[in-house]
């Protein structure tokens, strides 16, 4: 089988030390050694987000969508009225999760190519919303929402601010204190560049108080997870190898400095976006996350280009679904990629587009 290079948003190319860690014999986890691993995950994760004093960490064995679902179940209830920014398939997913959990939900629907603005937000003021839910990066389109603006809006309207940062974490700036964020949801297989299977969640003290009011989930009971985390444990069997890698990877990142990781992804994104100017494709004009770049191929079938890149060059890009299926591909900038990898991708695109 041809060696594949992942230019995707998740899973991504993993680092050698992570591959080594995840390929070793699993340790027993109900002891002090593994408790130290979970406490390290807690300390480093909250530090990476500049979480407010008194914030809480929850490590769930599930996908990022599981983290989204668990957060809605634990933080919101039937007395809430929430606003979801719906700019693509993941905004739609957040709205579906809320509706499935019987939360009164309104969406602000952005058409493709439409940027979220302060004017749009202000049209939603004074309507009794108690929470705002947003995907920091709408991964299906690559649009990055202005989290500073959204945080100010929530503060003015006394709303909980819940952010799915699954694709955006470590690629774009995120600061719970400065941006007034109450809940951050991330996942292990994006910029952390680990195997799928773990969702990391941070709760502000205000969000923690809401969780104390009860929930309808057994496996995803935040109160149970927080109580167990006090001793560095989880209520049920965790994804042991992934948590070992979370602690190791966050240790590397925080030793180097969170800003260095953010700068790396910004430079990669800028480098690729400069190179792609030599290829007859278009990039949308709305604000983009550093995690990926959407490229529009109006004169060629994007599905055919995807297959050619995979079969001929061993390069995997993110295909798109729905109405964007035939016209858009997305190029990821996270994971173990070098500038030379993007140069090779550009050469392949020049030949195929």
Image: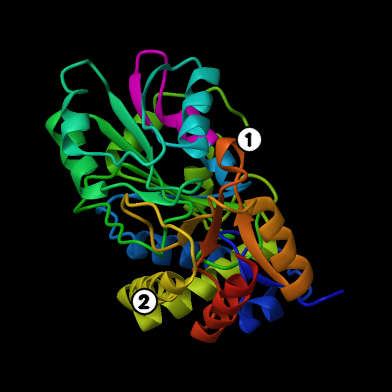
* Residue occupying the point 34% across, 23% down: 82
Return the residue nearer the eye: 163 or 149: 149
Instruction: Report the residue marked by disc 1.
Output: 219
- Residue stretch rendered in magenta on the structure: 69-85
Answer yes or no: do the residues labelled 2 and 1 have beta carbons within 8 Å?
no
| Residue lying at the far left of the rendered structure | 156
* Residue occupying the point 58% across, 79% down: 347
> Left of 288 or right of it: where is 228?
right
Residue 288 sits in which quadrant?
bottom left
Helix, strand or loop at mark 2: helix
The location of residue 166, given as percent across then percent down, is 48, 51
The crowding category of the residue bearing disc 2, from other C-alpha atoms within 10 Å (few below 14, some 14 to 19, many at least 20), is some
Return the residue nearer the eye: 58 or 270: 270
Return the residue nearer the eye: 284 or 330: 284
Tell which tag, 2 or 1, sits nearer the viewer.
2
When the figure is inspected, residue 342 is found, relative to residue 151, above or below; the finding is below
Helix, strand or loop at mark 1: loop
Quadrant location of the N terminus?
bottom right
Instruction: Kindly report the distance in space between the C-alpha atoms of the residues bearing marks 2 and 1.
Output: 40 Å
* Residue occupying the point 57% across, 41% down: 65
Instruction: Report the residue marked by disc 2.
Output: 267
The location of residue 275, given as percent across then percent down, is 43, 76
Quadrant location of the C terminus?
bottom right
- Mark identifier at residue 276: none
Q: Earlier in the sequence, mark 2 or mark 1?
A: 1
The location of residue 303, given as percent across then percent down, is 68, 51
* Residue occupying the point 41% across, 30% down: 75
């Amino acid at each position: 089988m041809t060696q594949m290079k992942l230019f995707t948003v998740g899973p991504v190319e993993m680092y050698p030390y992570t591959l080594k860690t995840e390929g070793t014999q699993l340790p027993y986890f109900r002891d002090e050694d593994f408790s130290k691993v979970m406490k390290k995950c807690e300390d480093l994760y909250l530090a990476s987000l500049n979480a407010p004093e008194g914030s809480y960490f929850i490590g769930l064995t599930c996908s990022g969508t599981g983290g989204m679902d668990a957060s809605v179940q634990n933080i919101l209830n039937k007395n809430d009225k929430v606003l979801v920014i719906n700019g693509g398939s993941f905004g739609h997913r957040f709205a579906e999760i809320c509706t499935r959990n019987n939360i009164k939900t309104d969406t602000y629907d952005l058409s493709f190519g439409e940027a979220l603005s302060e004017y749009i937000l202000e049209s939603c003021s004074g309507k009794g919303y108690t929470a705002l839910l947003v995907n920091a990066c709408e991964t299906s389109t690559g649009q990055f929402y202005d989290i500073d603006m959204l945080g100010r809006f929530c503060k003015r309207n006394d709303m909980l601010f819940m952010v799915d940062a699954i694709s955006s974490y470590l690629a774009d700036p995120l600061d719970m204190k400065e941006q007034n964020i109450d809940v951050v949801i991330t996942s292990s297989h994006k910029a952390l560049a680990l195997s799928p299977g773990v969702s990391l969640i941070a709760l502000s003290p205000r969000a923690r108080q809401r969780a104390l009011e009860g929930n309808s989930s057994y496996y995803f009971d935040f109160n149970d997870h927080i109580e167990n985390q006090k001793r560095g444990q989880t209520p049920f069997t965790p994804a042991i190898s992934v948590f070992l890698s979370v602690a190791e990877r966050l240790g590397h990142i925080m030793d180097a400095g969170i800003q260095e990781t953010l700068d790396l992804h910004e430079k990669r994104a800028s480098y690729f976006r400069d190179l792609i100017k030599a290829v007859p494709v278009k990039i949308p004009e709305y604000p983009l996350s550093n995690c990926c770049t959407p490229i529009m191929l109006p004169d060629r079938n994007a599905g055919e280009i995807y297959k050619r890149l995979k079969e001929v060059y061993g390069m995997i890009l993110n295909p798109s679904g729905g109405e964007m299926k035939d016209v858009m591909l997305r190029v990821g900038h996270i994971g173990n990629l070098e500038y030379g990898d993007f140069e090779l991708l550009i050469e392949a695109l020049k030949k195929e587009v």
